Amino acid sequence: MTFRAGEWKTVAGAGFGVALLGLLAGTAVADDALKLRELSPNGADVCFGRVYDAAHLKAHPKQKVARIFFYYGHDPVSRPNEEPTANAETSYNGFLTTTVRGAKAPQWAGGWCNHESEDGTSGPIRCGMDCDRTMASLKVDDKGRLVVTDVSADLYLDAGSEEELGKAEYDRQALGSEDDNFRLDPMPAATCKAEFARIDPIDPALGPPLRERLKPDQAFCYGRDYDAAHLASHPNQLTQSIRVFRGPVELASYASGGDVANWPDGADIAVSVTTRLKSGKVTQTYSCQGEADQWRCAASSKMSDFSCDIAQKEIFLKRGANGTMMLANPNSSLAIIDLCSKASDGKTKSDDKVYRLEPMPQSACAP
């Protein structure tokens, strides 16, 4: 079992004040979405873009951007994922994507685009981002082209990245000194949607998200049993058998306190493992929430007592191809070892990091 960094996200949550501020700002601009008649006279989603040819790029060696598209309208980036449907709508109304020379995929940023005047109906158009950053300033020229200015070199980087990365790496990741003052031609909205789809192409084999496959009132069972040949070829793997399931106990817990509108947030799952080290299986409960394209599940003490705080012990679930489920255990958070022992500190040291699990009859997950 291999684990590739970057495939599983461990995202820190925003503080309540920051989250509330973003919510209030988003609410304020959501009602004004698509009101910029200079960009969209009829209120429909619009697209502007440009692909630079070799001659232009040769004449502008300090311009890194080879492709650039701006989309004003409803979110072209997000698609059905594991987050509750209540969180599906974004308040952004402006989306910028660029592909630099030699890159295989675009990068993108989203923001709120509005007039800077007090009444919000006149003056320059500024697209702001979180943390009071500017994504771009916009205007339409007399030929109907969108002029995009004030694009910062660190558009896709965190504040303070130059100090953190060092000058050489910062210069490599940042946009170039000539990456500004773009003039983009009007294009069909479908062109922008296709460009944004290049950022993270959909794999049809993955099918619907887990939150759609697995219903709030539905029991399920996924697992895998490793044979002698597999274990012989993976001597550092401790797991002989693993099950991930929701049964009567987990269903009753959600029925008594869960919010179906926010499914899968608050869903309990159980994970049973049998290892080479112990006879019999050990079962641990986790409480999950949807986060991007995964379920983030923190160990819970609901069903057992612990001498330590196990809430930081997290596993991650993702949909796999052809109806399978992937489980990641990057930080020693499965009960293959004592979760309160020193052996559970830090990253998983054994070859028990990622599992590909098959759907099984519910009887295979019986206690």
Image (spheres, helix red, strand yellow):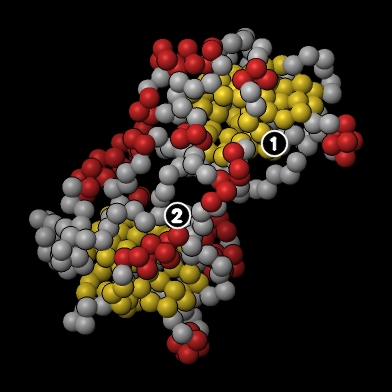
Q: Is residue 319 above or below residue 238?
A: below
Position in image of residue 201 (x %, y %): 51, 57
Asked whether 176 or 238 is in front, the reply is 238
Could you tell me which residue is drawn at 72 percent across and 30 percent down?
A: 224
- From the viewer's perspective, is 195 left or right of 17? right
Asked whether 357 or 128 is in front, the reply is 357
Residue 355, numbered circle: 1
Asked whether 144 or 141 is in front, the reply is 144
Quadrant housing the N terminus: top right
Could you tell me which residue is drawn at 68 percent across and 28 percent down?
A: 223
Q: Quadrant of residue 240?
A: top right
Position in image of residue 335 (x %, y %): 70, 22
From where the camera sits, is residue 264 visible? Answer: yes
- Among the two numbered marks 1 and 2 on one chain, the one whose residue lies closer to the N terminus: 2
Residue 41, numbered circle: none
Could you tell me which residue is drawn at 12 percent across and 64 percent down?
A: 122
Q: Describe the element under mark 2 as helix, strand or loop.
A: loop
Could you tell me which residue is drawn at 32 percent across and 46 percent down?
A: 90
Q: Describe the element under mark 1 as helix, strand or loop.
A: strand
The residue type indicated by label 2 comes to: Ala
Q: Quadrant of residue 263?
A: top left
Residue 159, numbered circle: 2
Camera-nearest label, 1 or 2? 1
- From the viewer's perspective, is 54 left or right of 97? right
Position in image of residue 60 (x %, y %): 46, 85
From where the camera sits, is residue 239 visible? Answer: no
Position in image of residue 218 (x %, y %): 49, 22
Q: Is residue 184 above or below residue 307?
A: below
